[in-house]
Amino acid sequence: MTRVSARKALDKLPPNLKNQVTMNATLLLNASYEPLRIISWKKALTLLFAGKVEVIEEYNEQIRSITFAIKLPSIIRLLKYVRVKNHNHVKFSRANIYARDDYTCQYCGKKFPSEDLTFDHVVPVAVGGQKRWDNIVAACFRCNHKKGGRTPEEAGMKLIRRPTEPHWLPAFHVTFRLKSPPDTWRDYLYWNIELDI
């Protein structure tokens, strides 16, 4: 009964109250307190009424119906741990190739900003080289041009180190469309989370 009346209360909010609380997003944590994603306060209350989460922090704003009043959740935590897909798998991307190679050309050994780097196929595509972790390296434009469509041996160049698939976790990326995250979230945002504010 409570679940039905709560859903009705969410759907029948007055327009002025809807506008007032739309900025109150909720940070969803895994059972282990790791941040998973940012969800709407409506979704947060739906999870709460379904008994799937507990409230960790609240906003001062609240919604009211005839039978109850409830503060909007700022942070909620899942009661059961959810496995994150490919959590230990590093995405194959240009940015992660540069990060793996420490923004360093793997031929001349000089460090460059990302805009001055490209990637190079160690074994060229023309002779069967594939786009994989163990065949792609960061290279500066000069070295990439010098090597051309040859292997390092054919070009008389040496790799600083053989490329391999990295086993570190990439930065967990959370995008905020708010001017600034709520203060209550700061204790749950770890050093490896990148904030776009």
Image: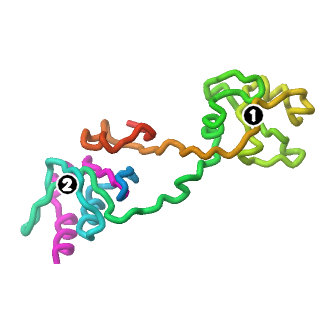
Quadrant the C terminus occupies: top left
Compared across the picture, whether 151 is left or right of 92 comes to: right
Residue at image point 15% right, 55% down = 71
Q: Amino acid at mark 1?
A: Arg
Residue under numbered circle 2 = 72
Q: In the image shown, does 69 or 18 lie closer to the viewer?
A: 69
The answer to which quarter of the image holds residue 185 is top left
Give whichever of discs 2 and 1 has the lower sequence position.
2
Residue that extends furthest to the bottom in the rendered view of this protein? 1
Q: In the image shown, does 71 or 19 lie closer to the viewer?
A: 71
The answer to which quarter of the image holds residue 157 is top right
Magenta stretch holds residue 87: no
- Magenta highlight range: 1-30
The answer to which quarter of the image holds residue 183 is top left
Q: In the image shown, does 91 or 65 lie closer to the viewer?
A: 91
Whole-angstrom CA distance, mark 2 to mark 1, is 53 Å
Residue at image point 89% right, 35% down = 150
Residue under numbered circle 1 = 161
Quadrant the N terminus occupies: bottom left
Q: Amino acid at mark 2?
A: Leu
Residue 195, image x and y in percent? 41, 38
Magenta stretch holds residue 23: yes
Residue 47, image x and y in percent? 29, 65
